[in-house]
Amino acid sequence: MIASHKNYFLTIIFLLASFDVLSEDDPHIFIDQNAQMMVQVLIENKDLFKENRNEYENKIKEIFEPMIDFKRVAASVMGKKYYLASTSNQRNNFVEIFKDSLLDTYAETLAQWENQAIETIFPEEVISNNIKNIEVKQILNTGSSKYPISYKLRKNDQNWMIVNIIVNGVNLGLTFRNQFQALASNNNGDINLTLDGWVSDAGDAGISG
C-alpha cells in the first residue's frame, strides 16, 4: 500500500461531486458547475467530519455516487481476465467494495483541505450532441502550484458519467487496475481473497496544498 494518498483522493472528490444528477448537454458546463458547487459543500461542511462522521459520509455519498459510473470503472479495474473469471455476485460485491473504499478515504481527507480554486478549460468549438465519449480538462490552483486534471466521460441514455480521471499525470483507472492485478496475482487468482484484501490507494500524485 502506498503510504500517502490523502491529497490525491481529496483532489478528485473536490473536483467531481454534484448536487444535480441531471445531465448537462455540454459536458464542460456539467463538470464546471458541479465542481464549483462542490466548493460550497466543502466550505459549509468543513467541521462536520469531527462532529458527526456518519452524517458527513452520507453527505459525500449523496453527491459523489451519481457522478461516477462505478460498474464500468470497477469492471475496468478488475480487467478482462478477472472480470470474466468472476461470478455476477463477485462483480457486484467489488462495485460496492470499490465504492466504499474510496468513500472512506475521501471522508477522512476532505476536512483537511483549505479553499482551492479550479478552472475548467472550455473548447473553442461547439460539442456535437452525437458525441458519447469526451475528455474535460481542468486546472487545480492551490495558490502555490497548478495541477492539470483530466476527466474521461461517457454519456449514457440520460447522463454524462465519469469513467476515469487523470490527476497531474497519474491515471487513476490504470493505477487501480495495476493494484488489482498485483493483489489477484498474490492471491493466486482467488477473487474472494482479492476482494477481501482490497484497499484503494493511488498515491498523492504529487499534489500538495
Image (tube, rainbow, N blue to C red):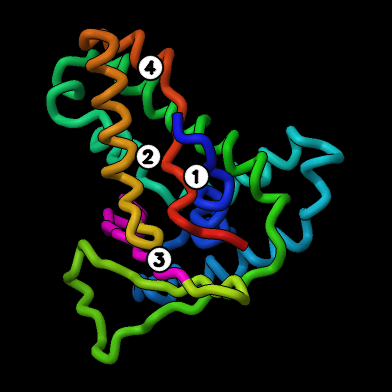
User: Is 101 on the left-hand or right-hand side of 24?
Assistant: right
Q: Secondary structure at mark 1?
A: helix
Query: Could you tell me residue 7's position as x and y percent?
Result: 56, 52
Write the residue at 45% across / 36% down.
201
> Which SS class for mark 4?
helix
Q: Is residue 18 visible?
A: no
Q: Which residues are magenta?
A: 147-165
**Amino acid on which disc 1 is placed:** Glu
* Residue furthest out toward the bottom: 124
Residue 3 is a magenta residue: no
Q: Which residue is mark 3?
A: 149
Element marked by disc 2: helix
Q: CA distance from mark 2 to mark 1?
A: 8 Å
Q: Which residue is mark 2?
A: 70
Sequence-wise, the earlier of marks 1 and 3 is: 1
Identify which amino acid the numbered label 2 is placed on: Phe
Q: Compute the Cα span from label 4 to label 2.
A: 15 Å
The dot on residue 159 is: none
Q: Are marks 2 and 3 in contact (CB under 8 Å)?
A: no
Residue 37 position, x and y percent, is 62, 68
**Chain-order first, disc 2 or disc 3:** 2
Tell me what residue is drawn at x 45 percent, y 29 percent. Answer: 1
Q: Is residue 126 above or below residue 179?
A: below
Q: Tell me the tag on residue 195.
A: 4
Going by the numbered disc 4, the residue's amino acid type is Leu
Q: Is residue 174 above or below residue 161?
A: above
In the rendered image, the vertical position of residue 9 relative to residue 91, given as above or below: below
